């Protein structure tokens, strides 16, 4: 695990420990007649234990070694118990917080074993095994707290990383659907017109088909550039260069499909109105993909499109004749349409019905989505 740099908080905690440990030593000198009197050696070891906590964030193992060594020496010389033990707890906590579990556990166990050596010489020690409980409190408790904090921070970091990855995956999938819809629709229209041109024997009719191919290619490229401009970093003015796809462009979409040789019967009920941006784009893309499927797979060159504006929703339907017994497999396009609808809280159903193939969608349109 990579450790951090020395922080102001580290300096603050160490400063508090220095003041607390050194400031209480004069009062500890008279707490027990069995203890060794506080002298310069006690002040030196106590100061070393407190100052040893300073690099605990950047060098937790070295800091723990200094603090444990100074504290053990302090206790082996039979100086009185006191706040110097807090330095040990802080060092062990940082060790568990900053180091992986296994090496931290080994270091903490070595510190505990070294700390226990004073029980045979310190006059106020409870002796073994009674001394195990208070001694372990200054090692096991801060170690457990440090491990818990490390696990919590690692879990939060993993969660944030997963959220960022999910956001990237969602953006990629959204872009894939946008490009699929734009390019797929344009190529389907171009292919249809190219097939017509190949089978026509009159130059004038072939010229008309080629002009339709040129228009379809230009419209598809323009829409693709607009789509890519909306997601390219630093291109806030990109979408203004071309109309954004939406229900306002539905008549243009119908003319484009009809120029590819598919007759479209469009019925709009209710009062057309401005839809929330996400719903407006999704509704257009659903109709675009459904009509593209008609151009590519329809049994006859005709489709019926229904758009119903309701107070809280907009209903869409595209229906075309289906060849009897033709297999149906929901591909990337159908999956993308369903995902679009469901991401907005809507619903999409697609499949054979009474000799036809129908795509029906309901999108919420009562407010901002």
Image (cartoon, rainbow, N blue to C red):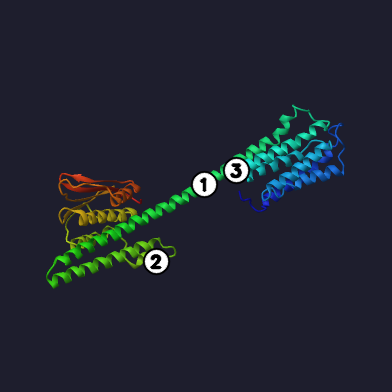
* Residue situated in front as seen by the camera: 80 or 77: 77
How far apart in space, not on screen, are marks 2 and 3 (Cα)? 45 Å
Secondary structure at badge 3 equals helix
Q: Name which of mark 2 and mark 3 comes first in the sequence.
A: 3
How far apart in space, not on screen, are marks 1 and 2 (Cα)? 35 Å
Using the rendered image of the protein, determine whether residue 355 is visible from the camera's viewpoint: yes
* Residue situated in front as seen by the camera: 226 or 269: 226
Q: Which residue is mark 3?
A: 150
Q: Which residue is mark 1?
A: 158
Packing grade of label 2 (10 A; few <14, some 14-19, many >=20) is few
**Residue 20 at what x, y percent from top left?**
76, 43
Q: Name which of mark 3 and mark 1 comes first in the sequence.
A: 3
How far apart in space, not on screen, are marks 3 and 1 (Cα)? 12 Å
Q: Is residue 357 left or right of residue 32?
A: left
Residue 223 in the image: above or below residue 331 = below
**Residue 104 at what x, y percent from top left?**
65, 42
Q: Are marks 2 and 3 in contact (CB under 8 Å)?
A: no
Residue that protrudes farthest toward the left in the picture:
202
Using the rendered image of the protein, determine whether residue 273 is visible from the camera's viewpoint: no
Closest to the camera, between mark 1 and mark 2, is 1
Q: Which residue is mark 2?
A: 237
């Amino acid at each position: 695990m990579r450790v951090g740099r020395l922080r102001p908080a580290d300096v603050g905690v160490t400063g508090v420990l220095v003041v607390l440990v050194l400031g209480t030593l004069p009062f500890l000198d008279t707490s027990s007649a069995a203890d060794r009197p506080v002298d310069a050696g006690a002040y030196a070891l106590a100061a070393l234990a407190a100052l040893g906590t300073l690099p605990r964030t950047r060098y937790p193992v070295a800091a723990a070694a200094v603090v444990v060594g100074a504290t053990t020496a302090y206790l082996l010389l039979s100086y009185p118990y006191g706040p110097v033990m807090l330095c040990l707890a802080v060092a062990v906590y940082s060790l568990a917080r900053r180091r992986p579990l296994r090496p931290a556990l080994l270091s903490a166990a070595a510190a505990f074993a070294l700390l226990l050596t004073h029980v045979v010489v310190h006059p106020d020690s409870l002796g073994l095994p009674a001394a195990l409980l208070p001694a372990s409190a200054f090692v096991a408790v801060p170690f457990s707290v440090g491990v818990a904090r490390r696990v919590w921070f690692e879990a939060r970091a993993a969660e944030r990383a997963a959220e960022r990855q999910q956001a990237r995956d969602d953006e990629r999938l959204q872009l894939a659907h946008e490009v699929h819809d734009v390019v797929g629709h344009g190529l389907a229209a171009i292919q249809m017109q190219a097939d017509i041109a190949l089978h026509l024997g009159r130059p004038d009719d072939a010229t008309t088909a080629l002009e339709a191919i040129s228009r379809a290619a230009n419209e598809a490229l323009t829409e693709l550039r607009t789509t890519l401009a909306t997601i390219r970093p630093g291109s806030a003015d990109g979408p203004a260069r071309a109309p954004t796809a939406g229900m306002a462009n539905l008549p243009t979409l119908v003319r484009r499909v009809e120029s590819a040789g598919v007759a479209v019967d469009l019925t709009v009920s209710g009062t057309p109105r401005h839809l929330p941006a996400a719903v407006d784009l999704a509704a257009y893309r659903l109709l675009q993909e459904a009509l593209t499927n008609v151009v590519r797979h329809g049994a006859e060159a005709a489709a019926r499109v229904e758009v119903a504006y309701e107070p809280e929703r907009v209903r869409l339907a595209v229906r075309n004749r289906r060849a009897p017994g033709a297999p149906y497999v929901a591909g990337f396009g159908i999956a993308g349409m369903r995902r679009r609808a469901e991401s907005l809280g809507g619903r999409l159903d697609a499949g054979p019905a009474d000799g036809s193939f129908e795509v029906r969608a309901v999108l919420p349109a009562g407010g901002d989505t």
